[in-house]
Amino acid sequence: MKSKLLCLTVLLVATGLAGCDRIDPNSPLGKRKAIYQQMLDTKEDLGGMLRGRIAFDAQAFAAGAAKLDELSRQPWQHYPEVKEAQSDARDEVWQKQERFHELARALEQQTAALVSATAGAALTAEGIAPAFQQVEDACERCHQEFRVY
């Protein structure tokens, strides 16, 4: 009986400790990560259409571009004044906030340009690819400066 109680106690403690490194989904970090994941999923679907992994659907692409544009404006509000211990962002996000916000605005401009480019009458993968590349480039520029890989 005591050994069962001891095993149960050890199991409960181990389970509790295993959850200690989880991110609170309601924290600024949790909210940012959720938005970034949605951005990544959306961007991967759009890229998949352009690269032939997914059949190109002009209407779905335009809807995805609009979603990406909307998402691109959301994560910035979830950066607190002080870096969280679990953050994947470099300290420079907080040390070089002007540059960080400059790159954030650049991404927003590129996603807006992508949406504008989808308004054309005959949307094709080849025609929209350059605007999508500009979005990917904007993401990469920010990641190079501010993300820890």
Image (cartoon, rainbow, N blue to C red):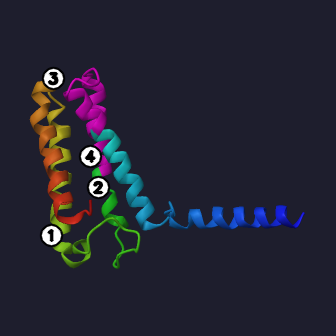
Nearest the eye: 147 or 73: 147
Q: Residues within 10 Å of mark 2 (few under 14, many from 20)?
A: some
Q: Which residues are magenta?
A: 44-71
Q: What kind of residue is marked 1? A: Arg
Q: Is residue 70 magenta?
A: yes
Using the image, tell me which numbered label, if any, was put on residue 69.
4
Quarter occupied by residue 135 = top left
Residue found at x 58% / y 63%: 18
The CA span between labels 4 and 2 is: 7 Å
Label 2, on which residue?
73
The N terminus - image quarter: bottom right
- Secondary structure under the numbered disc 1 in the rendered image: helix
| Relative image position of residue 38 (x, y in whole percent) | 37, 46
Label 3, on which residue?
124
Q: Residue furthest toward the front?
A: 3
- Verify CB contact (< 8 Å) between mark 1 and mark 4: no
Q: Residue furthest toward the right?
A: 1
Residue found at x 17% / y 52%: 140
Is 27 placed above or below 43 here? below
